[in-house]
Amino acid sequence: MAKTTDSPKPSVALSKKANLAKFALWIVGDTPLITHAWSEKARREMLAKQVKAVQVAKSARDPAEDFQNSLYELESGVYGFPAMAFKSAITSGAHKDKGITKTAVQGALWIDAEMVRTRPALAGAICDMPLLRIWSGAPEMREDMVRVGQGLQKKSSLAYRAQFTTWAIHLTGRVNLDLVPSETLVFLINEGGFSAGVGEWRNEKKGMFGAFHCADAAETKAWESFAAGKGKLPRISFKEAA
């Protein structure tokens, strides 16, 4: 007679409910944030190359249009930034030598975001992007010298993109406190904001833009007042390193 085996019993770890907690905090920019969204025009040009379509002569450069296209628009006059950029920066601060792995943080952290449908290159396709609102003054156009192309074909050019000089993000979501306690989350935000950053020319990409930190009580009060329309735009405070 064939031997029968008992059904596997669920382990204690698998039967335990995850210790999820909601969080809400402010992330404050230490250096200006440079945005560079993919424009519909750039997407169409990329698609045309991939499908071997007939190339249409490029139109004259319009710096104002480049600036506007570099923004992630939530609604008229309100702009955002990809939520995954912040999650990536926060996750980058984790390491097994610090007692928590990047994989653990990736799975333990959920960031709330608004899904915004962008206009894709291919008619009928969709592209939903999770964005976080940028709290700031009006974006400014910046001009940068850049190198475009590949290898020896690189050429110097000018890039016109949006800059938010004073900015903050109201970050909300859920976190598994068994894997990422609240003090660890704050540490990871500060570590990722300093060593990685977000946007163009961030520290992670040999730049000095897009740095941020977790707001203290005074900064939180100031940004909440500004967001409620009851206070002025807070100023960036460059703190002396401890």
Image (tube, rainbow, N blue to C red):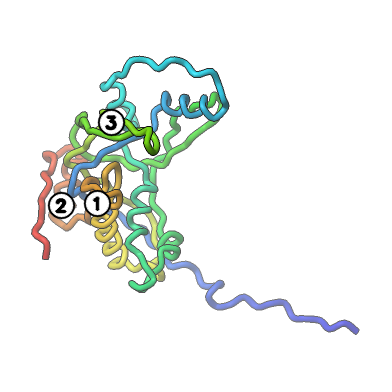
Q: Amino acid at mark 3?
A: Ser
Q: Which residue is mark 1?
A: 26
CA distance separating discs 1 and 2: 8 Å
Q: Which residue is most to the right?
A: 1
For the residues bearing labels 1 and 2, Cβ distance under 8 angstroms: yes
Residue under pointer 2 = 219
Q: Which residue in the rendered view is the most extreme toward the left? A: 240
Q: In the rendered image of this protein, does residue 239 appear above or below residue 19?
A: above
Position in image of residue 21 (x %, y %): 38, 62
Whole-percent x, y for residue 89 in the image: 33, 54
Q: Of callouts 1 and 2, which one flags the residue occurring earlier in the amino acid sequence?
A: 1
**Mark 3 touching mark 1, by CB under 8 A?**
no
Whole-angstrom CA distance, mark 2 to mark 3, is 40 Å
Q: Which quadrant is the N terminus positioned in?
A: bottom right
- Could you tell me the amino acid type at mark 1? Trp
Q: Position of residue 67 (x, y in %)?
A: 28, 27
Residue plotted at (54% across, 30% down): 50
Q: Which amino acid type is marked by label 2?
A: Glu
219 sits left or right of 175 in the view: left
Residue under the image location 35 percent in, 59 percent down: 92
Label disc, if present, on residue 156 of the rendered structure:
3
Crowding around mark 2 (Cα neighbors within 10 Å: few <14, some 14 to 19, many 20+) is some
Q: Quadrant of residue 168?
A: top left
Q: Is residue 88 above or below residue 82?
A: below
